[in-house]
Amino acid sequence: MKSELIVDVQPTEVSIALTEDSRLVSLQKESRNISYAVGDIYLAKVKKLMPGLNAAFVDVGYEKDAFLHYLDLGSQFSSYFQFVKQALEDTKKVPVLSKMKLLPDINKHGSVTDLLEKDMTLMVQIAKEPISSKGPRLTTEITFTGRFLVLIPFSDKISVSQKIKTTEEKLRLRQLVESIRPKNFGVIVRTSAEGKRVAELNHELKTLLKCWDDTVQKAQHADVPSLIFEEESRIVSMLRDVFSPSFESIHVNDVETFSQISKYVDLIAPERHDIVKLYAKDEPIFDHFSITKQIKSSFGKTVSFKSGAYIIIEHTEALHVIDVNSGNRSKASNDQESNALEVNLRAADEIARQLRLRDMGGIIVVDFIDMNKSEHRQALYDHMKEVMANDRARHNILPLSKFGLMQITRQRVRPALDVVTAEKCPSCYGKGDVQPSLLFTDVLKEKLEYLINDLKVTGFIMYVHPFVDAYLKKGLISLYRRWKIELGGKFQILPDQSLAYLQYKVIDNKKNEIDLAEEKDLETSSTKSKSKAKNRNNEE
C-alpha cells in the first residue's frame, strides 16, 4: 500500500492529508494561532473545586478554565504531588525520581477535596483539546511520546502494544525495556518498536528522559500559569504515528515546514531523507494531488459510494448518527437480503474511513439496512471490526441490535473535523447553497452510466446549462469526448439557457423527458424508515 502525506501551509492554517493508494484517509487542520495541543504540559493553578462533579477547574492560561477530574489524577498522585512540591520548593536542584520511594496508590473512589486545594500549583498535561464551549481536559499522569516508546513517570509498569501479534516478540521487547528503563518510570512499547534493536530503543528512551528532566527544570523557574513543555507540531506528531516502510513521499508547499519535516525524517530514518519533497508549482498543492475533490465529495452530509448507495451523517452535541441507504440500484440477480448485506458491507468500509477522516469521537450510532438472517448480522459485525482494526484511536464496537443499530464508541481527543462543502448559489447571488461544482461532472457521468447501462436507453439528449456545456467540451480531449468513448457514444449533451447552473434534463429519442429526480433515483429516508418500522413491529 502506497502512503503519502500532503501538507498545505497557509497563512492562518495548516492542512495535513494522508492518502493510501491515492485515496484520502485522514485530514487534519491546525490553526497557526492556536497554542493548545494534546500533549502540552503546563504549570497551572487550581481555581475552583467542584465536589458534585468530583473535579476541579484549573487555570492554564486559556480563556476557559481547564477541567481536571479525580480519575485523571492518576493512581500515583501522592508520589507525583510530593515530587512536584519538592521541586518547586527547592529550585537549586532537580529531584531524582529514580531515587524516590513511591507512596501507596490513592483511593480510586476518593474525593477531589481530599487531594486538591484552591490555589494549589500542579504540573498538568492537555489530554483533550477544547471542544465546543468547553475548556481543555487535563491529566496529572504525565507522559512523553516517542516513535517507539511512551515514557510514564511515577510508574513501574511495562506494557506492550496488542497489535504486536507474536508472543516471542512481546516477551523480547518487555525484557529489553526492563533492562534499560530506570526505576519509577513506566514504559508503553508501541507497535512501531517491533523488530527494533536495543540501541534504537535505548536512544529514544534517553531522549524521553531528557524531556522529563528539562520539563521539571523549566517548571522550577516558571510563572503560574505557563507552558513548560510543548508537544511537537501536528505535522511531526502525525508523521511520528503513521511513518512506516510503505511511506513513499511527503509533499509540502512551505520552505520552513519542509526544513522541519526533513530534520525529523533525518532523525528517525536518515536513509529515507529523499522522500520529503518541496512543492513549488503555481497550482494549489491539494488541487494537484486531487485532495480538494476528495474533500468536497467526502465531507458533505450525504456521502455516496458504489452502486448508488449512500450514507447520511448527522452530528449532535451528544452523539453522531449515521444512516445507511441503499438507493435503487441493487443487483437484480440478488434477493433483498443479499442486496442488504452487500450494501451494508460497503457502507461499513466507508463508515470506517469517515470516522478516521473526520476524526469523529464519542458515541456513534449506525442505522444499517435491516437483515433477517443472523449469519448476515454476524458477518457485518465481523467486517466492521476488521475494517476498524487500522484505526489508531481507541474504539469499541457492539454487535447489531434487533433494530439494526450498531453502537460504536471512539476516542475523542479533539473536535470532529467539519468542512463546508456547499457553494453559494450563483442564481440567487449567494442566498442559497448548491452542490460543489467540482462534483457536478461526477453526478452527470453517473446519470449517463445509469441511463446506458441500467436502463438501456440510447439516442437520448442531456441538456445542461451553457457554462457546464462549455466546460464539458473544452479542449481537444474533452470530458464529453472521453465519455462518448467510454460509454458507447449513443447520446448527446447540448446547452439549454433555461436551465439553472447545476440543473440538467434528459430527453429520449421520442421527445419524452426521462425523470431522473433524486427522490426517485434513491430510496428516501422516509420510505426506509417506514420499512424499518414495519420490520421491527413484526420482530416484536
Image (cartoon, rainbow, N blue to C red):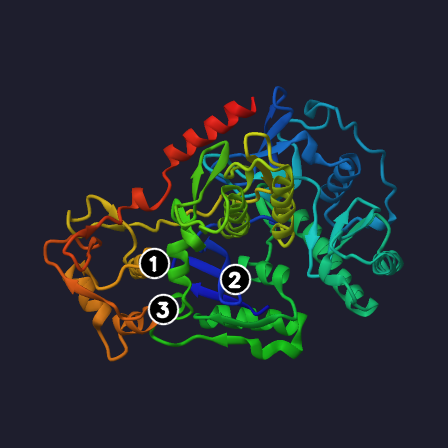
Q: Quadrant of residue 272?
A: bottom right
Q: Which secondary structure lies at badge 2?
A: strand
Q: Closer to the observer: label 3 or label 2?
A: 2
Query: Which residue is label 2 attached to?
Result: 18
Query: Residue tagged by mark 3?
Result: 284
Q: Is residue 153 shown above or below 262?
A: above
Q: Nearer the viewer, mark 3 or mark 1?
A: 1
**Residue 237, image x and y in percent?**
59, 58
SS at mark 1 in the image = helix
The residue under the point 35% across, 49% down is 420
Q: Which residue is mark 1?
A: 446
Amino acid type of the residue tagged 1 in the rendering: Glu
Q: Look at the image and tell me in which quarter the C terminus lies.
A: top right
Residue 199: x and y in percent read: 81, 69
Residue type for callout 3:
Pro
Residue 289 relative to residue 412: left or right: left
Residue located 62% across and 70% down the image: 246
